[in-house]
Amino acid sequence: MANDKTLRAVHVGLSTGHAGSFDDSRPRLIHDLRRLEGVEVVAYCETYDSSFLDEAKKYDPGAGLYSSLDDMLAKEDFDLAVVVLHPSDVAAALLKLADAGKHFMVDKQFALKSDELIPVTRAVQRNELTTFMLYPWRHHPAAIEIRRLIEEDVLGKPIDVESRQFWGQVGGPLGKDIDAPAHRLDTEGGGVLHYIGCHHLDLMRAVMGCEVKSVQAMTGRPFGHMEEPMEDIIVLALEYENGGFGSLHNGYTKPITVGDQGYDSAFVLRGVNGWAEWTPVGGNKLQVTSASPQWKGAPEKTIGYELTPMDSIVGRVWYYIWIEQFIEDIRAGRPGVPNMVDGLHVLQSIDAAYESARTGTRVAVKYGVDV
């Protein structure tokens, strides 16, 4: 693909998740797609609520409008798609796009279960497509710094990783909407691990530099507003392929007060030479301690980040720069990071975690398209 070619893009899904709004109240992917250099948005597709197509017509009068992805594929000439749908509908849409040879960027979660992604992954590999799965945290400056410190032997070989993520309660007087698609089994497919924990599972894979080998999980339903078996809280013990270990603790457990949606997060990486601590949500500092000779004069350091705000999907420039990388990867013929295989592997580890919680046993994770 010529580097100077304008890439023609479509937006599939306007009413859900990180699509955002057409006005400036929630400038997310709809706005991000329009401002990417070298990209022309040619069409919008919305299957859930037709009123969003009316809004799209006002926002972008020259673009095509569709209530069916099949119609869009039949009538529009485009190179890439941004997909923001309920997990129950994502895999089928991605398979159609991949079979048609279209690159895509897709908001999580990518399916109800991992086996739905296997034919998609095969089609992506067969057609050598660039894919971009919206698990952003490995691209945060702090995560990039942790990887650099590992590679430069300041932290040394990673031997343990710890993640904590807690959101506000679902249901109850001040809780999140129990009827929202993210909190229903038919549209989401799982509880807090499926919706939130996926992000840090990918981040943990990135900093450990390998996959989860086996998982032991416990789930709980202290509030029980979501339908069974969706969990309010989950704890994972993880064994990695490099011999290291990890723990992940997620919950919809924080009481929500007026004006506070409730979020608590932490991330710790321990290596043979030192450790790094970081607060992913709202944190702009990385605390590092190292016994490496390189840091003999100052074994403890605080690395700060000036996270420039931006009217984007997470309100920071670093996220938008990551989205720009997707366009560069398409032009260069690269697979994208994280790509379709990464998305498949995270979901395969989630499926193994749910199996472990159901059976009370340690479960080996099976990866790839032949499981």
Image (cartoon, rainbow, N blue to C red):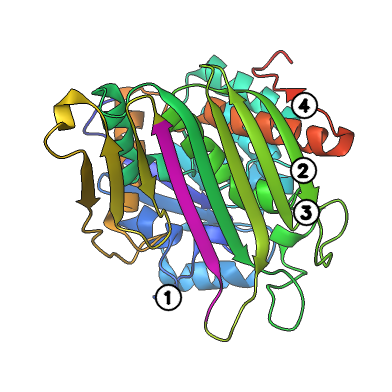
The numbered mark, 1 or 4, whose residue comes first in the sequence reads: 1
For label 3, the residue is 231
Specify which label sits upstream in the sequence, 3 or 2. Answer: 2
Near mark 1 (Cα within 10 A), the count class, few <14, some 14-19 or many ≥20, is few
Q: Which mark is residue 341?
A: none
Identify which residue is drawn at 64% across, 27% down.
Answer: 120
Question: Gap between marks 2 and 4, in whole Å?
Answer: 11 Å
For the residues labelled 3 and 4, say whether their Cβ atoms are less than 8 Å apart: no
Name the spot of residue 311 as percent of width and height, x first.
Answer: 33, 67
The residue that disc 4 covers is: 362
Report the quarter where the N terminus lies. top left
Residue position for label 1: 23
Label 3 vs 4, first from the N-terminus: 3
Q: Quadrant of residue 172?
A: bottom right
Q: Amino acid at mark 4?
A: Arg
Q: In terms of sequence position, does the residue under pointer 2 or pointer 1 come before the other?
A: 1
Q: Which residue is mark 2?
A: 218
Q: Is residue 235 above or below residue 28?
A: above
The image shows residue 146 at horizontal and vertical percentages of 32, 36
Q: Is residue 68 left or right of residue 53?
A: right
Identify the secondary structure beneath mark 1. loop
Q: Secondary structure at mark 4?
A: loop
Instruction: Sort mark 3 into few (<14), some (14-19) or many (20+) by Cα contacts within 10 Å.
Output: many
Q: Position of residue 81 (x, y in %)?
A: 49, 43
From what the image shows, is residue 306 above or below residue 179?
above
Label 3 amino acid?
Answer: Glu
Mark 2 surroundings within 10 Å by alpha-carbon count, few (fewer than 14), some (14 through 19), many (20 or more): some
Give the residue drawn at x 30%, y 57%: 284
Asked if one can make out residue 215 in the rendered structure from this viewpoint, the answer is yes
**Disc 1 to disc 3, C-alpha distance:** 35 Å
Disc 2 or disc 1, which is closer to the eye? 2
